[in-house]
Image (tube, rainbow, N blue to C red):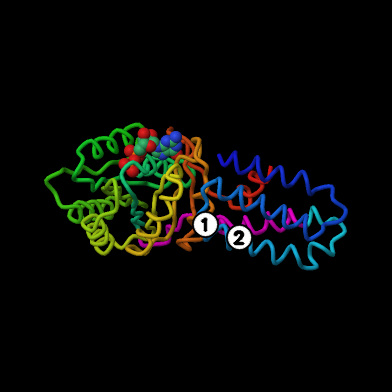
Amino acid sequence: MLDNLSNRLSGVVKTLRGQARLTDANIQDALREVRMALLEADVALPVVKKFVNDVKERALGQEVIGSLTPGQAFIGVVYEELTRLMGAQNDALNLAAVPPAVVLMAGLQGAGKTTTSGKLAKRLKETQKKKVLLVSTDVYRPAAIEQLKTLAGQLEVEWFPSDVSQRPVDIALAAHDYAKKHFHDVLIVDTAGRLAIDDAMMAEIKDLHAAITPVETLFVVDAMQGQDAVNVARAFNETLPLTGVILTKLDGDSRGGAALSVREVTGKPIKFIGVGEKLNGLEPFYPDRMASRVLG
Ligand code: GDP
């Protein structure tokens, strides 16, 4: 995860760590390396520019130059700015609603919505002892409904039946009603995704959102999509009042730059990261830990 970025930045760290003095030229070199590293990791250009500028401003100030260990101080600034870029701290899932707390999963097809719905159900069941209900509103792909049913079976979490002849809003409302009557704490609503953003899909999920007023509207995005992930994130963020992001497939050979851009572009916290196909492959996202990892 973010290995290339990490390799490159740890090179900068090594060069600077022992320096007793930093000159303007040293700093410019280091900033150039940081910029290259971020661009190679597929971080969006405007995000890279802003990041490098922020680091530069601080690096040329007394905080770094005037420090007894300027190399260390520079690295400290990069660490702090990376952490800030990714959202500063972990934002936990918000379930503060009259039960059932509704969690709506949005994103493109293949992003990992269904798998992540299962992972989230497992997590809520095991770590918070929540009674969870899973429902799929993907009326375009019967296989998607079956996939969620299978996951629910594996997890021994209740699954609400749905069928391709129904309207997504009707399915969600029926599931909500059922969850209320049966005292479920959380209702996770998986939605249909298209291969690309289209108006019909956006209108449908907007209607769904309006009908069930979720407390969490999570945008699920594949980190392997690189720059594209940022564009998709922007489009969803403009359509829906997103409350958070789940970045999937960070275990793969993705360059991972999306992790650094998505927060900045949407202003919404990355709440979890997907780190494997298995149902335990979901972790809360900690910007500071990720920044430490990246700096090696
Ligand atoms: P959906 O169309 O958005 O519902 O996507 P799916 O949940 O069906 O996932 C698409 C593919 O991505 C499946 O093969 C999943 O196993 C895989 N997948 C989902 N999340 C992760 C992850 O965090 N890591 C890896 N390696 N694969 C994932």
Residue located at (27% from left, 41% from top): 159
Percent across and percent down for residue 167 are: 15, 52
Element on which disc 2 rests: helix
Element on which disc 1 rests: helix
* Ligand 1 within 8 Å of the CB at mark 2: no
Percent across and percent down for residue 107 are: 34, 50
Q: Is residue 121 left or right of residue 27?
A: left
Q: Residues within 10 Å of mark 2 (few under 14, many from 20)?
A: some
Q: What residue does disc 1 label?
A: 45
Q: Residue furthest front?
A: 25
Residue stretch rendered in magenta on the structure: 74-98
Q: Is residue 83 left or right of residue 223?
A: right
198 and 32: which is toward the camera: 32
Three-letter code for the amino acid on which mark 2 is drawn: Phe
Percent across and percent down for residue 283 are: 51, 43
Q: Which mark is residue 14?
A: none
Q: Residue furthest left?
A: 165
Q: Is residue 104 left or right of residue 282?
A: left
Q: What residue does disc 2 label?
A: 51
